[in-house]
Image (cartoon, rainbow, N blue to C red):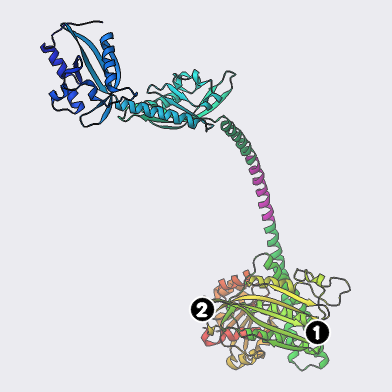
Amino acid sequence: MSSHAFNPDQGWFRRLFDSSPDPTWIIDGHRFVECNEAALTMLGYRDRAEFLSLHPSKLSPPTQADGEDSYAKAERMMAIAQEQGQHRFEWTHTRADGSNFIAEVTLCAIDVGERQVLYCTWRDISARKRTEAALEESRRRFRALSTLSSDWFWQQDENFRFTEFSGAFAHDFTPPANTIGRTRWELNIDLTPQEWAAHRAVLDAHLPFRNFEYRIADDKGEVRWYSINGEPWFDDSGRFVGYHGTGSNITARKRAEEEVRALNAELERRVRARTAELELANRLLTAANEAAEAANLAKSAFLANMSHEIRTPMNAILGMAHLLRRDQVTPRQAERLDKIDGAARHLLGIISNVLDLSKIEAGKFSLEDGPLDIQRLLADVTSIIAERARAKGLALRVEPATIPTGLRGDATRLQQALLNYASNAVKFTETGTITLRLDLEEESGDHVLLRFAVEDTGVGIAPEAMARLFSAFEQADNSTTRKYGGTGLGLAITRRLAELMGGWAGAESVPGRGSRFWFTARLKKGRDGDAGATVANGQAEAELRRRHGGCRILVVDDDPLNREVAQLQLEAAGLVVDTAADGAQAIARARQATHAAILTDMQMPNLDGLDATRRIREIPGHERTPIVAMTANAFAEDKARCLAAGMNDFLVKPVVPERLFLILLQWLDPERH
């Protein structure tokens, strides 16, 4: 035992003793003989005398944390210090207010004259003990949780040295014992200097990190990939005490990603190759489309030319037959004229059907939007088939429904569709009744859906033939011995027209008992006055003579026979007619006289009807003269060109006299212009 003789009352010792920041006291025997202010403050005592009167064991709970009696432990600790000269131990202290804390106590034995005293210093380590307890609890939980996870857990101290690993770590690395106490950069981790610098900067700043990936090569040179997450750890005072986190083996994922990249590269290569193939296919398709478009244009041009070339003489044939019928002819002559008229109209129907089907298939078919008189439409269809029905002794009935007035749609196409059905009904019925039926299927605020149907008591249709009825150029009987004629276009066109009008077409039939053909059409609602004034069927010529007899009309046509037919028909209606053989003559006639209306062909030599119309509009007095195209050009684009040139209306040859008179009535009435 070493001893140091000194005088405790010396000034330097007193100054050192009193100014020490650590709580300090001196024990002589079993009592306090001196203490500094730091001890009084830490323990919460104000009266030094009271404090010095206490036995050291009284500054603690009766029993210490280790279970030993405080008095006995105090005696034992002092004895050890006296024997060894110095002793350090932990002691649970009690403050004056009764609260406890843990201190680290150092006892030094000092000789003072002939006797020995104990010089005691201590410091509060409660915060450290709580941190250690928390660390130990964390380790306990860490070890418990680590057994439940395929990932591994790790801990580092404040110097970034590993202190703990879970059991799963051994499956991916060498045993944890070979890693404990080492830092991460002391391991065989494959990172670039830049990657190491970035990671070390995060650690030095005590920041959390996520998904830090690195590579390690094992003893066999096989590279494995790992991903770790880390959180910094601080004690209650905010002091950094290390990191803890998780780690996982991501080698399988990395290999899968590599395989995916390889697959993507291969897929990209194939996509590029496929794209090149598609681009080539698109170029070929474009070339094919251009060829098809050229073929369609050629087809359209051919059909338009065919239509023009056939309709022009057909207009003359039908017109002359009409004019001859007006003269005094014998019954035999009238019969032959009827046959001429019937044959010509049959040929005209074939031409119209072929053109209509071609326009629909080419997407160039357009519907008119005009006022409709549905009852008048039914009456017109009935009047057209009435003579043929009477000739066969068939009864003809009409059963109309009550429908809203003021409807709008394409009257011509509605009549065409219904007439296709009605004509077939007459053709295929020998005895019984033909019934035209109209039903209101739906009605909304803006539209109505009407169902038109024709029922007959004819031969009917076999079930196996029903499926092909509405296909182009198909008939129920396609044999060479078939009894009834026809091209097989009428039903196909009726269905296409119904589709264009927002409806559908179909049929039901019982062989030997008759058939029922129907189609639906969605029509717009207009104003009640949209239908306007009408002229009774067959009375247009008389009305034209009564209202506008003596008016001067200019007929422009390069075909002499067609000019003659038009002139005779108009003069029979009481009109005065001037004629011109081309557009240039038409302009000259227009300058010479004022005309109530002008009827002009489109295709003519020298100057066509379009250019002639534009120039006539520039002549004073003809700015608003009704100009009507009367042409064998039957396509929708032909009508559009005529209207764009300044014409008011459009008539397709062969011109039905009744239709011609109705058009003139429409444009010659003062309210029209």
Whether the magenta-drawn stretch holds residue 287 is answered as yes
What's under tag 2, amino acid-wise?
Answer: Glu
Res. 243 mark: none
Measure the C-alpha gap from mark 2 to mark 1: 44 Å
- Residue drawn at the location 23% of the way across and 31% of the way down: 98
Quarter-of-image position of residue 46: top left
Task: Indicate the position of residue 528 as horizontal and vertical percent values.
Answer: 53, 84
First to last magenta residue range: 272-291
Q: Quadrant of residue 536?
A: bottom right
Residue 249: % across, % down: 54, 29
User: Residue at the location (42% across, 30% down)?
Assistant: 138
Can the viewer see residue 22 in this picture? no
- 512, above or below 496, in the image: below
Q: Label 1 neighbourhood size at 10 Å, few (<14), some (14-19), many (20+)?
A: few
The residue singled out by tag 2 in the image is 623
**How many numbered discs, if any?**
2
Q: Residue at x 49, y 19 (%)?
A: 177
57 or 292: nearer the viewer: 57
Instruction: Give the side of residue 189 with respect to residue 76, left or right.
Output: right
- How far from the left and from the top, in percent, is residue 392? 81, 88
Q: Quadrant of the N terminus?
A: top left
Please identify the dominant SS of the magenta region.
Answer: helix
Give the class, few, some or many, for how many residues have Cα within 10 Å of label 2's Cα (few <14, many ≥20): few
> Quick one: SS at disc 2?
loop
Q: What residue is shown with label 1? A: 339
Q: Is residue 47 magenta?
A: no
Which amino acid lies under the numbered mark 1 shown in the image of this protein? Lys
Between residue 246 and residue 296, name the one nearer to us. Answer: 246
Is residue 160 toward the left or the right of residue 52 in the image?
right
Q: Position of residue 329 (x, y in %)?
A: 79, 93
